[in-house]
Image (cartoon, helix red, strand yellow):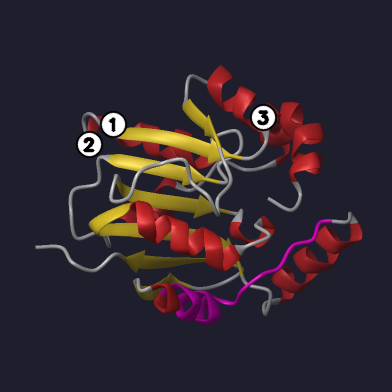
Amino acid sequence: MHDVRYFERFAPVYDLAMPAADRGDLAAGLAAAERPVERVLDVGGGTGRAARALARDTEEVPGRDVTVVDASARMLAEARGAGLSAVRGDAAELPFRDDSVDAVVVVDALHHFPDRDGALAEAKRVLRPGGVLVVRDFDPETLRGRLLVAAEHAVAFRSAFDAPDDLAARMERTGLNARVLDRGFAFTVAGVEPGAT
């Protein structure tokens, strides 16, 4: 992740500044899967905002296993402190076997990855056939998106944002069947790994 050193510094107060992940947005993305979603990676998950939202689904999906993956040790310490499973790793070199998970979620983080294409390819690699990659991010072509881009660059983040259709095209180039699920300042794109029976 480009900006790991910043997240290391702000880990103890990160959850105070950031709103909780929207469970409904994530559920809509996971519903695009063509297989049961039992094992999920929250990549670039930091303190586990998305993982906590997904963990609330365990009554509906008993046995769902959600693991936070992040490059920041301090962010992961916060996730573990909240009782979440957490693994340190680079989004472009996930420490998981091929075809080993049903879903990968990346919430408010893809724009921080130095190798976005590598991260998407790694998500595809670890997905089982019919599994889904769900990316929730911010549209730099909206007014609020332009302000966010300017603010992140002002504090020396090296963020690089995709508009929804550009991200869907990026996913398609990795071999996922992608579609934009919703649009606006925040948007969701889901990419399904082909080959489900």
Q: Please provide percent x and percent y for residue 75.
A: 66, 32
- Find residue 53 and report its image quarter: top left
- Frontmost residue, 181 versus 77: 77
Q: Amino acid at mark 3?
A: Ala
User: Along the polypeptide, which appears first: circle 3 or circle 2?
Assistant: 2
From the image, tell me which residue sits under label 2.
Answer: 61
From the image, tell me which residue sits under label 3.
Answer: 73
Which residue occupies 81% across, 56% down? 157
Q: Amino acid at mark 1?
A: Thr
Q: Please provide percent x and percent y for residue 191.
A: 36, 67
Badge 2 element: loop
Q: Are marks 1 and 3 in contact (CB under 8 Å)?
A: no
Which quarter of the rendering shows the C terminus?
bottom left
Q: CA distance from mark 1 to mark 2?
A: 5 Å
Q: CA distance from mark 3 to mark 2?
A: 29 Å
Few, some or many C-alpha atoms within 10 Å of disc 1 (few <14, some 14-19, many ≥20)?
some
- Frontmost residue, 163 versus 129: 129
Residue 166 position (above or below residue 4): below
From the image, tell me which residue sits under label 1.
Answer: 58
Residues in magenta, as a range: 157-171
Q: Are marks 1 and 2 in contact (CB under 8 Å)?
A: yes
Choose mark 3 or mark 2, whichever is in front.
3
The residue most toward the left is 197
Badge 1 element: helix
